[in-house]
Image (cartoon, grey):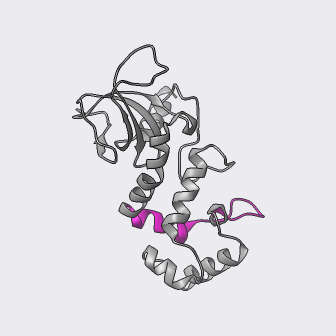
Amino acid sequence: MPEIVEEQRRENLEEHAYVLDYLPTGRSSSARSEPIVQLLGDEKFTLLEAVPKVPEVHIGEKVYIGKGERDKIAIIKGRLAYQDLTEGAKNELVSAVSGIIRSNEPKFVEIFNNAGPLNIRMHALELLPGVGKKHLTAILDARDEKRFGSFDDITKRVPLLQDPVKLIAERIIVELKGESRFYLLTRPPQRADRY
């Protein structure tokens, strides 16, 4: 049993992350003055706090945080709650999330192709902001005819639907804020002291 738990834990670990903010002297509320970076994992959108190895880390930069030899990150201190992000990190978050979605387009297009009902009253696609019953029916009808191939394909075949990247990004932000009952795209929030 402990091996299964450890394997699941390893599966949830991020390999790469994007720098949301860099605090060269750390948090003002911290007793220790050490540089801190706030990160967003590119697989499960995990919010993390880490200590950099190098004196300068750039906002928006992709860094390796996996188990192997890291070139820019020394220590992962732990997970962060959305509320613990700096204002700079919160401002960078939408851009970072949108960039991750665009760079993994096939993965996120599959959400539109494969999403199913959550219960007898609600479909997973209805969790995307702006998708109500009419849009849901249009998406399901279009995907029954032929699977979606790209975000452009979704936009062309589902009239009046907002930009799919924006819809998914908004949903991810809602989940990161902990404002949802369902967590489809991110890791559910947990205590900030555990990664």
Q: Residue at left 50%, top 84%?
A: 156
In x, y percent, where is residue 113? Answer: 53, 71
Q: Kindly tell me whether residue 147 is visible in this rendering.
A: no
* 123 lies left or right of 35: right
In x, y percent, where is residue 97? Answer: 45, 54
- Counting every numbered tag in the picture gives 0
* 149 lies left or right of 121: left
Work out which residue is located at the far right of the displayed protein and give it. Answer: 121
User: In the picture, residue 11 is in which quadrant?
Assistant: top left
Q: Residue at left 54%, top 29%?
A: 192
* Closer to the camera in the image, 189 or 12: 189
* 145 lies left or right of 31: right
Query: From what the image shows, is residue 81 above or below residue 61?
Result: above
Q: Is residue 122 magenta-colored?
A: yes
* Closer to the camera in the image, 80 or 147: 80
Q: Residue at left 46%, top 80%?
A: 153
Magenta part of the chain: 104-124
Query: From what the image shows, is residue 168 above or below residue 172?
Result: below
* 72 lies left or right of 76: left
Q: Kindly tell me whether residue 181 is visible in this rendering.
A: yes
